[in-house]
């Protein structure tokens, strides 16, 4: 049964909220933003057709408060709720509450979110669909169980401990030796409980020099499932991605076809609907890939897939939520460009500690083949309560070299952010590194090359020097000759 969506409440803030508003505006769909007291002047509040305050700054009192968000949607007369990514995007209870309130949930069915949110259950589905999984054990009770598995299966260190209910790089601890097991085990359980309210763990073989490849899927409620090719998301810091690209430079055409149709098979097996992503770890040493998880939401990096295919994933999500059949066939989906994305976080580029404050100057990259997905404006405050992502910068080109060249210009010449620190110097150092340009990297690239990357940071640009001279001239003009002159 089809239901028309004419008014969407976006249960998010910053970059994801703005991204969803862009498509809603294109489709003449009214938008309502929600905001906390700390976000009353935020960019997403400015852009929405209307906005509702839902509580104080801490996320539990605002962006994670399900009752307040649904109450706001009913109050303004919205038809549907889009959760974006992060916050409540993969919360099955919230999805159920939205539907129970008579609203349309713009995302996959709640039962699918619940099943895929449990890594143990997700691996069972993967095995049923004949998708290769990383060797490991589920529902780890104690350290002795891990030692027994290592002994019996002849597993070599390092291994990975993961939160069973986890995702987004949280609750993951790499263990290098048996001596480290007790501390790592307690750390993983503690992180899992803090992040997900459940300390269940699983243990897996750690893939050395692994590469992170994910396949974008869209499925409707009529059983049709298509893929929009793959993305390479290998470059990470603290298990969180900072640079993504599509297609992947790691695989050839035969492997691309195999990995993409494996993802389609899995999503069909679990009864998926809406946009979602199947994540794999690729072992370049053996040319094998293994299932990692299913992300039951719009991914941060969906923009690179949109750039190479010309499709709007948010628009497709709206179509599926309305009950329509997918308007595209698999044979019609072509990837005819290369695209790159960097996540611009307000963080110290060396220590990765968050940087709060007011953006005193903001100059955005422009020009051909550049796409910006921003969550801030010049003069905006960066509050300490939320994710540090302030902007996504994407570039495209006929091939990988062209996309990298445009990104070099965007980061190195055109972008200026003042008032807060960003990881822009690190991003620029990575895309200029010979190994990255040659496509030779793994998930440990940043930690292995950090000293080298920091040494590549450019302290001052010629523009900085020009500004310094201009300030000096202005001072002399205003105050006259100085005592030291």
Image: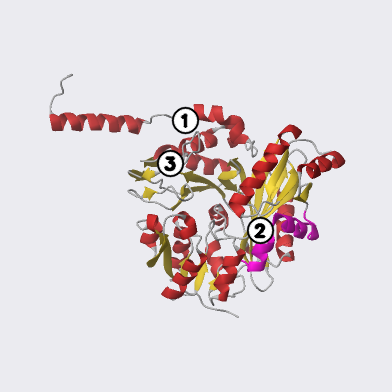
The mark that comes first in sequence, 1 or 3, is 3
Q: Position of residue 203 (x, y in %)?
A: 74, 45
Q: Residues within 10 Å of mark 1 (few under 14, many from 20)?
A: some
**Between residues 229 and 45, which one lies in front from this camera angle?**
45
Farthest residue, direction left: 480
Examine the image and state in which quarter residue 267 appears.
bottom right
The residue that label 2 is drawn on is 117
User: Does residue 296 appear to the left or right of 131 in the view shown?
Assistant: left
Q: Nearer the viewer, residue 308 or 62?
A: 62
The mark tally for this picture is: 3
Residue 376 in view of the camera: yes
Neighbour class for label 2 at 10 Å: few (<14), some, many (≥20)?
many
Residue at (67, 74) in percent of width and height: 222
- Which image quarter: residue 1? bottom right
State the separation of the CA atoms marked 1 and 2: 39 Å
Q: Residue at x 63, y 68 (%)?
A: 110
Q: Is residue 35 above or below residue 429?
A: below
Q: CA distance from mark 1 to mark 3?
A: 18 Å
Residue bearing mark 3: 355
């Amino acid at each position: 049964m089809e239901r028309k969506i004419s008014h969407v409440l976006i249960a998010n803030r910053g970059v994801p909220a703005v991204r969803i508003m862009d498509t809603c505006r294109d489709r003449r769909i009214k938008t309502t933003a929600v905001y906390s007291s700390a976000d009353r002047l935020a960019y997403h509040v400015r852009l929405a057709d209307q906005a509702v305050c839902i509580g104080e700054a801490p996320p539990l009192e605002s962006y994670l408060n399900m009752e307040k968000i649904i109450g706001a949607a009913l109050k303004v007369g919205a038809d549907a709720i889009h959760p974006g990514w992060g916050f409540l995007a993969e919360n099955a209870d919230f999805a159920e509450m939205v539907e129970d309130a008579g609203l349309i949930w713009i995302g996959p069915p709640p039962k699918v979110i619940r099943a895929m949110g449990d890594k143990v259950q997700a691996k069972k589905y993967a095995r049923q669909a004949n998708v290769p999984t990383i060797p490991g054990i589920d529902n780890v009770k104690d350290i002795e169980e891990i030692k027994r598995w290592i002994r019996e299966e002849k597993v070599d260190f390092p291994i990975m401990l993961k939160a069973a209910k986890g995702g987004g790089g949280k609750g993951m601890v790499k263990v290098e030796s048996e001596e480290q097991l007790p501390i790592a085990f307690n750390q993983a359980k503690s992180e899992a409980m803090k992040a997900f309210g459940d300390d269940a763990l699983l243990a897996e073989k750690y893939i050395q020099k692994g590469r992170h490849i994910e396949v974008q899927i869209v499925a409707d409620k009529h059983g049709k499932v298509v893929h929009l090719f793959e993305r390479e998301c290998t470059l990470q810091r603290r298990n969180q991605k900072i640079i993504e690209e599509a297609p992947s430079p790691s695989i050839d055409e035969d492997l691309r076809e195999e990995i993409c149709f494996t993802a389609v098979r899995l999503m069909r097996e679990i009864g998926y609907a809406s946009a979602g992503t199947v994540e794999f770890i690729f072992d370049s040493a053996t040319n094998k890939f293994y299932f990692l998880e299913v992300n039951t939401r719009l991914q941060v990096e969906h923009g690179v897939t949109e750039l190479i295919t010309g499709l709007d994933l948010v628009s497709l999500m709206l179509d599926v939520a309305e009950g329509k059949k997918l308007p595209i066939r698999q044979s019609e989906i072509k990837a005819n460009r290369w695209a790159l994305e960097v996540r611009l976080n307000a963080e110290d580029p060396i220590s990765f500690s968050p940087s709060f404050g007011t953006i005193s100057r903001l100059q955005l990259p422009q020009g051909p083949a550049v796409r910006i997905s921003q969550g801030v404006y010049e003069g905006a405050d960066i509050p300490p309560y939320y994710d540090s992502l302030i902007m996504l910068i994407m570039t495209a080109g006929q091939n990988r070299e062209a996309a990298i060249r445009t990104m070099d210009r965007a980061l190195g010449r055109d972008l200026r952010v003042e008032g807060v620190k960003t990881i822009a110097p690190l991003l620029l150092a990575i895309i200029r590194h010979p190994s990255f340009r040659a496509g030779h990297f793994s998930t440990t690239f940043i930690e292995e090359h950090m000293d080298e990357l920091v040494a590549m940071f450019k302290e001052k640009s010629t523009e900085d020097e020009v500004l310094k001279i201009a300030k000096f001239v202005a001072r002399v003009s205003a105050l006259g000759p100085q005592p030291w002159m």
